Image (cartoon, rainbow, N blue to C red):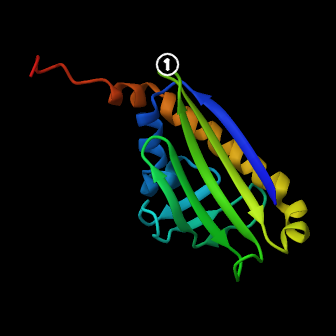
Amino acid sequence: MHQIVTHVDIAASPERVWSILTDFPAYPQWNPFIRSLSGVAKPGEKLRVTIQPEDRGAMIFRPRVLTVIAQQELRWLGRLGFPDLFDGKHYFQLTAFGNGQTRFIQGEKFSGVLVGLFLHRMEAATKAGFDAMNRALKERAETKEAIDQDKPDLSEGPR
């Protein structure tokens, strides 16, 4: 087994980060690595994921959702061909800090008989893609517009 793990600290609530992470139709607007993502974030459901590492062609996967814990974790399993050939358990984890910040962790655990053959060719590009997505998520979550969306609308007075 081999693992790639990246993280970024975001000056936004886990709720805000989660809302961006699970707004799959908006991915093409901001995500430089996962260019499109469709499906339902529910255990057992299949997603359609298009990734495009920098300077590489797009790849389409049909992973199965394993875990969904709102504002905490989204995890899926992608496979190349048959089980245990080349499997990737991709995960996003959010950890809340007491000061309204969130640590976003993105990683993938690779296993299977073909991992040694393929991983060395794709590891650097995959890690760079994770880092690029992390930076873009941070930027989107921390923009003034995003922060304003999290504030209650008091223009009509108390309710």
Residues 64 and 143: in front is: 64
Q: For residue 10, which quarter of the picture?
A: top right
> Which element type, helix, strand or loop, lies under badge 1?
loop
Residues 25 and 76: in front is: 76
Q: At 52% across and 52% down in the image, what residue appears? A: 74
Q: Name the residue under label 1.
A: 98
Q: At 78% across and 58% down in the image, what residue appears? A: 55
Please indicate whether residue 83 sits to the left or right of residue 49 in the image.
right
Q: At 44% across and 59% down in the image, what residue appears? A: 41
> Could you tell me the amino acid type at mark 1?
Gly
Is 132 located above or below residue 28 in the figure?
A: above
Q: At 68% across and 37% down in the image, what residue appears? A: 7
Please indicate whether residue 120 sits to the left or right of residue 34 in the image.
right
Position of the N terminus, as image quadrant, is bottom right
Residues 137 and 70: in front is: 70
Q: For residue 50, which quarter of the picture?
A: bottom right
Q: Position of residue 113 (x, y in %)?
A: 84, 74
Q: Where is residue 35 in the image (x, y as percent from the top left)?
A: 58, 58
Estimate how packed mark 1 is, as few (under 14), some (14 to 19) or many (20 or more) residues with alpha carbons within 10 Å.
few
Q: Where is residue 77 in the image (x, y as percent from the top left)?
A: 61, 66
Is 41 located above or below residue 47 in the figure?
A: above
